Amino acid sequence: MDRERVEEVLGDLKRGRLSVRDAMERLRSLPFEDLGFAKVDTHRPIRRGFPEAVYCPGKTDAQVVRIVERLAANSNVVLATRASERIFRKVRAAVKGKPLAYDEAAKLIVVGTPPKKRKGLVLVVTAGTSDVPVAQEAAVTAEAMGARVERLFDVGVAGMHRIIEHRSLLAKARVIVVVAGMEGALPSVVSGLVDRPVIAVPTSVGYGASFDGLAALLAMLNACSPGVAVVNIDNGYGAGYLAATINAA
């Protein structure tokens, strides 16, 4: 963090040379922290309201730990996605003085204390039990961003009575994340039942002709019911982030 520039902006604000809006605009463009192998965006919370997340695959354990350390030094809560238990143990050993949690299903590390839960409800729904890991990634992400989250799992279209039985819960949600593999039909069904935005998450669950989630992705992009937005295959983090953002608006 560039302390001199921050102090300069705050000094100009105090002396009346800058309005609050102008000061915020200057803070939005403050530089990142260059670690050599990564340029850590420590000011993303100012611009976006939530810190940069660390995507672990493709990075060494040491790189993940270092990035998490720097983000944790500048933010109240940090997420590391697709993390192994081994990486979690190394992060836990390196980051001191902050709570740490690891969701084994979601493979998600949460460092720090999430903000106080906001009003509204994010409901995370799965078609099947095999979709739960991606759904958990969405749910834990939204919770880390301060959303109140409920989960409704294994209510796919192979047994329509299961989802219809929960129409009152669907109606209470401000935004609904629907996670499904196979033919990816559930988001369209949910959207047809309630007047809530639906974020569809295709998963790579299914037999050969599902093409690792491509069939579900294309089905969701072609949803008949309006009000369905679609994220990428297995992108629970993206869905949870978007859901929490909508819920906070």
Image (cartoon, rainbow, N blue to C red):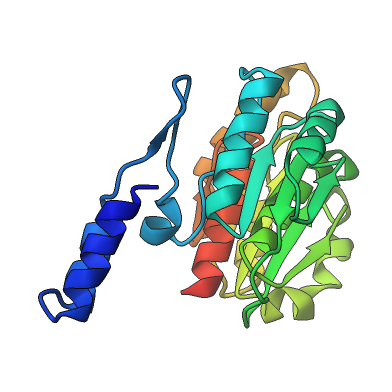
Q: Is residue 119 left or right of residue 33?
A: right
- Residue 145, located in which quarter of the rendered image? bottom right
- Is 60 above or below relative to 100? above
Residue 191 x/y as whole percent: 61, 63
Residue found 13% across the figure and 81% down from its top: 16
- 3 vs 30, nearest the viewer: 3
- 218 vs 237, nearest the viewer: 237
Residue found 57% across the figure and 72% down from its top: 196
- Is 128 above or below relative to 228? above
Total marks shown come to 0
Report the residue that reaches farthest toward the left. 17
- Is 39 above or below relative to 53? above
Residue found 75% across the figure and 48% down from its top: 96
Residue 181 x/y as whole percent: 74, 37
- 47 vs 243, nearest the viewer: 47
Q: Is residue 10 left or right of residue 230?
A: left
Residue 214 x/y as whole percent: 61, 27
Q: Is residue 234 visible?
A: yes
Residue found 65% across the figure and 46% down from its top: 79
Residue 237 x/y as whole percent: 62, 45
Q: Is residue 236 visible?
A: no
- 216 vs 65, nearest the viewer: 65
